[in-house]
Image: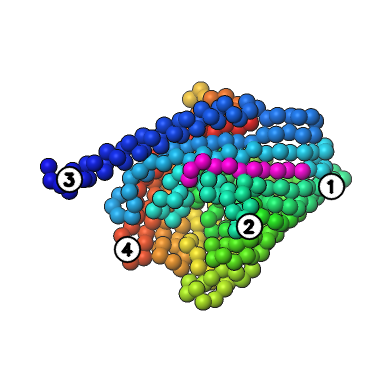
């Protein structure tokens, strides 16, 4: 055996040991989750409750050709929440975030994160503010109109994804798709966990939301103002319930252009819709576009998919999700990205679920070979 072959074999063995250790570590984390998280939400009294979600996953990537290496990594996200409600009209809400490791996100060669949860690095120095672990803290006041209308005002540390670009079948990285392309529109640049305010108006099947935030720092290190709005219509027909949304958003001129010499603002427009098709099937679609005056990785998004409930095979609480996203490149090195994702969610009980997930990914790079590969994941989620 030659020296080069022996070195390669040793490297392969070491990597296998490392991957096995990662899997054992995640298994240990799952045991800790079971021990330390409550079995169900804690209702301290009729106004105060404590709940949240914990999830751990091991992900293994297989890269075809150059661009990255085959490896497995694990990650953990734990987000407890405290809610204080006065018959729904006055609400205080606090969300905290804790993470263990970062999964494949730091080492994935792809332009889109393979798991869109807040992991270890994501809950530290939030938006350059020097704040760790305190994600959201806000107060809401809701007013009722005659009939079925409501008007609500919210202020504090908020997450714009709680109000914009929601979707019944593709919006939950803990229970649905894992890749960020199928959780929210990457072209929508929706910020989280910073100071802002929200106005929500609901009347009958219509709703309107307006969000503004002051974000501490973007990837260029500049603070900026975000503003966005959404109009939605919900319809219930013989097919089932469907919601259709239009989202528009922009920012102040604090993002560097491709040359790095000028600052530009971001602008985007997104359509997000979901529709039940009877008791078993559901479909979703997202279409998004953002301008490319500033440096952006992707400028257009086309995505959609199918949700299948498990009643047809005797497991009514289980479901299958199949999604596809195609993103046109912006003004950087990515010409196009494609994501296909499949998952099966096995519900163990009202608090625990296991999800097997497979992603097939491709990035077409300007002036370089394409990056292709697959990611296989096992995710455990506990809601309480």
Marks 3 and 1: in contact by CB < 8 Å?
Answer: no
Residue 153 position, x and y percent, is 78, 52
Numbered tag placed on residue 323 in the rendering: none
Marks 1 and 4, the one that precedes in the sequence: 1
- Which residues lie in the magenta part? 92-102
Question: Relative to 200, is 262 on the left or the right?
Answer: left
Furthest toward the top, the residue is 314
- How far is disc 1 from disc 4 in space, using C-alphas? 56 Å
The residue under label 3 is 5
* Residue at the extreme bottom of the image, as rendered: 261
User: Mark 4 sits on what residue?
Assistant: 368
The mark lying in front, picked from 2 and 1, is: 2
Determine contact: label 2, label 1, CB under 8 Å.
Answer: no
Residue 191 at least partly seen? no
Q: Is residue 1 magenta?
A: no
Upstream in the sequence, badge 2 or badge 3? 3
Q: Is disc 3 surrounded by few (<14), some (14 to 19) or many (20+) residues within 10 Å?
A: few
Q: Decide which of tag 4 and tag 3 comes sooner along the chain.
A: 3
Which tag is nearer the camera, tag 2 or tag 4?
A: 2
Q: Is residue 214 above or below residue 105?
A: below
Residue drawn 53% across and 70% down?
Answer: 256
- The image's colour scheme reads rainbow
- Distance Cα–Cα, label 2 vs label 3: 49 Å
Question: What residue does disc 2 label?
Answer: 129
Q: Give the SS element for disc 2.
A: loop
Q: Which residue is mark 1?
A: 143
Give the main secondary structure, helix, strand or loop, of the magenta stretch. Answer: strand
Examine the rendered structure and indicate whether residue 56 appears above or below residue 62: above
């Amino acid at each position: 055996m030659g020296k080069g072959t022996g070195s390669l074999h040793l490297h392969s063995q070491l990597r296998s040991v490392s991957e096995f250790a990662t899997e054992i570590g995640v298994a240990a984390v799952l045991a800790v989750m079971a021990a330390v998280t409550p079995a169900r939400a804690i209702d301290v009294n009729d106004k105060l409750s404590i709940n949240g979600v914990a999830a751990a996953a091991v992900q293994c990537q297989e890269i075809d050709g150059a661009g990255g290496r085959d490896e497995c990594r694990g990650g953990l996200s734990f987000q407890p929440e405290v809610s204080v409600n006065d018959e729904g009209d006055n609400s205080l809400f606090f969300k905290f975030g804790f993470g263990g490791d970062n999964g494949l996100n730091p080492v994935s060669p792809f332009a889109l994160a393979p798991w869109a949860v807040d992991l270890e690095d994501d809950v530290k120095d939030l938006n350059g503010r020097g704040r760790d672990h305190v994600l959201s803290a806000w107060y809401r006041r809701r007013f009722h109109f005659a009939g079925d209308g409501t008007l609500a005002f919210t202020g504090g540390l908020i997450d714009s994804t709680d109000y914009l670009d929601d979707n019944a079948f593709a919006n939950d990285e803990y229970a649905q798709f894992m890749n960020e392309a199928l959780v929210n529109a990457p072209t929508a640049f929706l910020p989280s966990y910073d100071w802002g305010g929200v106005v929500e108006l609901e009347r009958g099947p219509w709703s309107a939301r307006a969000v503004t935030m002051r974000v501490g720092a973007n990837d260029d290190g500049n603070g900026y103002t975000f503003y966005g709005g959404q109009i939605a219509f919900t319809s219930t027909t013989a097919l089932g319930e469907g919601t259709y949304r239009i989202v528009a958003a922009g920012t102040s001129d604090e993002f560097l252009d491709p040359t790095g010499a000028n600052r530009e603002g971001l602008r985007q427009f997104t359509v997000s819709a979901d529709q039940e098709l009877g008791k078993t099937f559901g479909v979703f679609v997202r279409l998004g576009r953002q301008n490319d005056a500033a440096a952006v990785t992707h400028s257009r998004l086309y995505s959609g998919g199918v949700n299948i409930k498990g009643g047809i095979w005797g497991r009514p609480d289980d479901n299958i999700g199949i999604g596809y996203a195609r993103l046109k490149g912006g003004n950087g090195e990515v010409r196009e990205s494609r994501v296909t994702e499949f998952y099966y969610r096995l519900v163990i009980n009202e608090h625990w679920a296991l999800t097997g997930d497979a992603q097939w990914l491709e990035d077409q790079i300007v002036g370089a070979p394409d990056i292709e590969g697959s990611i296989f994941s096992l995710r455990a989620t506990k809601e309480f």
